[in-house]
Image: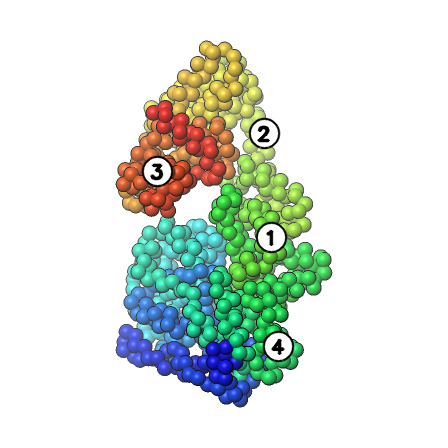
Amino acid sequence: MSGEFPDRQNEASQNISNVSIGDSNVVTFNQTQILQISVDEIKTRQFRETSPYRSLKTFEPEDKDLFFGRDQFLTGLVNELEHTNLILLLGASGSGKSSVVRAGLIPWLLEKKGSQLVHLTFTPDVDPFESFYTSLRSKYRQSEAQIALEAKTDTLTQVVTRLKQPDSYWFILIDQFEELFTTTQPQKCAQFIASLVKLSKNNYPGVKIVATMRADFLDRLSPYPQFVKATEKHRPLIAEMQADELRLAIEQPAAHHGVVFETGLVGEIIKDIQGQAGYLPLLQYTLNLIWETELTNGSIQDRTLNTSTYRQLGGVRGALQQRVDSIYEALLEQEKLATQSIFLKLVDIGKDSESGTEWKPVRRRALMSEFSNELEQNVLIKLINENLLISNIQLKSQKSTVEITHEILLTSWTNLNIWIRENRQAIALRNRLNDDVAHWQAKKAEDELWGGSKLEQVLELRKDSTFNQVLGGFSPAANQFIDASVGLRDRMQRRKIAIAIAFSAIIAAGGIAFGWQQQQSKQIIEAVFLSTDTTKILNSLPDFLKEADRLKNEGNIEESLPYYRRVRAETIKLIRNFKDNPEEKLKIQKLSDASEEALAQVIKAKLFKNLEDELNNGHYDKAVKKTYDILMSENIGAGADLNNNRRLDNQDEADLIPCKTLIEIRQKWLKHTNNYCDWYGKDSHYEAPNCTQIGKETLTTAIFEFPYDYAIKRIDFCSEKI
């Protein structure tokens, strides 16, 4: 029985709260009335063996009679829905965002609207338009729902216009909205958000949209200012449950099935929950495990859930860990290895995984086809049966997928947490490769293949025995992509060598014939500098600089950039390694200075307007991206990221950035941020408390990746020089 009431039990006995919405129809809402009902009376109810707790699963509309403790928040959510047609419901992982909509709001709407209600629920996945189409297929014919697949800005609007009946009420739940940023292809993400904004602006009567999203993904919305504006006054945050709400969520489902708690147990559980992150799924899992354990050993026959069982299971903090460990330890050795491989295929790594400073594991939804061997498939079924994984394999209209039941497993199961930490870089690289493979398979375009350091990393990983054994290696499609990338690399290398041989002959004959088309010019640049003959390189530099100046003066700025960048890069290396002959060194220094000055001019003429526009419009995240491109991009900027890993790894890379460019970027940022956002903060290289436009970071930490040593050296040098 309840610890607070030795011989009585709190109970939600009836629906008592009337809420008026819009059209003045009054509908009863499931708000809890707390009455004192005797333990004996509860025990006289019909006993139902089925557990009333959801374990790690989300509550669904059919679970409404077992969903307690969120009445106050639901009332606020209903009122919010009256004032807008688009709500972004925020909360931490494990806070119950999905459950409060599915088991609270949707049943309320069903009661209010009856047969008029059309409720559509989906998660974005790889293609949110396809996911929306699938949800429509449960209500409409394929020919009617087909329009959802068009993936245009007006797609959602067209769906509503064509399919919604005048007297119907559409409620659309976009669950796990953060998948747009972790799973969805970037282009589809942008298209879907634009389509969602357009639909909300049309303000169709009888169309309401709720999107649930983890609060820690809020910063990912900054590239979508229209969506930010559309939701800025309608972002309720679901907070932790109060003690009295938790008591209801714990006691009432059991009471519904004719069972009570031993005196003091509920209070002990609530005390154990305090300070536990993402406690709701852990709570539901523990309560379900207590129920199943006592059902198995027969002790539930006295209609009381016991403290001793709770403690033997390890309490809220230890029950999940203990249970998953027992499932894992019961497997054969080969099955254990397969389990590790399966779970690591279902994990992705959040941003900053390469720097190692701020990374976090997140769930990844995978196709069942990724688990190809028989052993993995057999273990997969076992893990699904144990409710550690969930699959939509029963949905015939979809490609079958599988995912980890709840993110709480990523942190609560020690083994998995260790596996992720040990393999996080390989996981991040593999998943990044898989995303690009999916794009490449559609058209097999050469420009989507990998090269440079990315290709070298993946080739090393492919040979790694641990990666192949523990993570299951690369899929056949990924291996096909890698082989195609190697083939392209080898063809390009052979072409460069052939051009280099021919070009050496031209140099020996006494000159360079310029005026080739842009693609030929780029090949020549690469070919000349494949040579290890310093004299040949040095003799060619003035001609390359002259050709760059000619292209710039004729207005061909983009064509001049590769010349200036390569002259600058080669002179930096030559100066650093040139020990003898001061006259030659001075000659190289003049070439280097000239190329740096010209590079700064070209960058300013070509790229600064875009940066200025973003700063003028207050799009600071986009301005950070533009600044990064100016300094680091090999395609459009100074090209300081020579090895394509987003970091300044050495002084040669740092010195590629023209000093004037650094100074002019600083001036523009200061001008548009009230002098708050600078390369350094007042007291630190890494923190700028007043630079709220970019999260109180300095420009140094916002633009460059950790470690920042070479960036700081270059900034300091340029500050003293100019």
Q: Are marks 1 and 2 in contact (CB under 8 Å)?
A: no
Q: Is residue 273 left or right of residue 32?
A: right
* Residue 692 picture location, percent across and down: 33, 46
Foreground tag (3 vs 4): 3
Q: Is residue 165 visible?
A: no
Q: Secondary structure at mark 2?
A: helix
Q: Foreground residue, 468 or 701?
A: 701
Disc ID at residue 682: 3
User: Residue 116 lies in what quarter of the image?
Assistant: bottom left
Inter-mark Cα distance, 2 to 4: 71 Å
Foreground tag (1 vs 2): 1
Q: Are marks 4 and 1 in contact (CB under 8 Å)?
A: no
Split into 4 quadrants, where in the image is the C terminus?
top left
Q: Secondary structure at mark 1?
A: helix
Task: List the residue tagged with mark 1.
Answer: 418
Q: Foreground residue, 126 or 75?
A: 75
Disc ID at residue 294: 4
Type of the residue with mark 1: Ile
Task: List the residue tagged with mark 2.
Answer: 494
Type of the residue with mark 3: Lys
Q: Are marks 1 and 3 in contact (CB under 8 Å)?
A: no
* Residue 263 picture location, percent across and down: 53, 78
Characterize the local packing of mark 3: few (<14), some (14-19) or many (20 or more) Cα atoms within 10 angstroms.
Answer: some
The residue that appears at 34% across and 34% down in the rendered structure is: 665
Type of the residue with mark 4: Glu
Q: Secondary structure at mark 3?
A: loop
